[in-house]
Amino acid sequence: MRKIKSLFTDSFHELRSLKTLAMSAMLLAIAVVLGFYTLQLTDYIKIGFAYIANELAGMMFGPAVGGVVGGLADLVKYLVKPTGPFFPGFTISGLLGGIIYGIVLYKKPLSMKRIIAANGLVTVLINLLLNTYWLTLLYGNTFVALLPARVVKQIIMLPIEVVLFYAVAKVLSRAHLFAGGGRVAKQ
């Protein structure tokens, strides 16, 4: 518990840096741009890649900054290109996703196992459980009715998201973007 508290403390201190604010703003802008390429398959199933920017924010600057970027990204994406009714639950999901990415990835050598853990936690806790619950509140369907299609989508998307994020992180690591934490571990 003490380690998680220190991760949040360190992450809040990151907000004092102009570099952190500028990079966070760029990651937020990237999330919004990637949001334009979200495929809305049904009211209940979307495929998008804006998570990459949120995951990078959590990895580079910790859970506090990752959460802020995740929450703001949801709000700005909705303002710029709404893909359905606004629902604050999804903003909470974005915030919590950024926090999870930050807890798992911040100030730690980056490895495929760690990325699988971070994305797996977000997939199960946020995408499958919390977002499905938000959809039941929003559209009135039962949780059990929505879950099977969402599980299939997440089973397909999880390996794609893991490999895609690892590739992006590896390229950015070679460019020495991740000073301190976020080093790519040898596989």
Image (cartoon, helix red, strand yellow):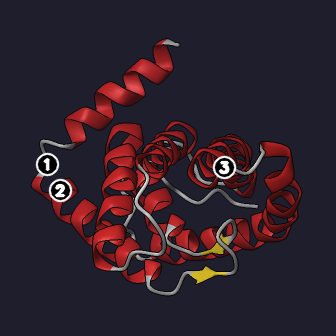
Q: Which residue is mark 1?
A: 17
Rendering coords of residue 145 (x, y %): 85, 52
* Circles 2 and 1: CB atoms closer than 8 Å: yes
Looking at the image, which residue is at 22% across and 65% down? Answer: 25
Q: Which residue is mark 3?
A: 140
Residue 72: which quarter of the image? bottom left
Rendering coords of residue 13 (x, y %): 21, 34
Label 3: which secondary element = loop
- Answer left or right for 85 relative to 163: left
Q: Split into 4 quadrants, where in the image is the C terminus?
A: bottom right
Rendering coords of residue 179 (x, y %): 36, 56
Q: Amino acid at mark 3?
A: Gly
Looking at the image, which residue is at 55% across and 81% down? Answer: 38
Q: Which residue is mark 2?
A: 21
Q: For this rendering, which residue is in front, 12 or 146?
A: 146
Looking at the image, which residue is at 44% across and 85% down? Answer: 36
Label 2: which secondary element = helix
Estimate the spatial distance between the alpha carbons at disc 2 and disc 1, rounded to whole Å: 6 Å
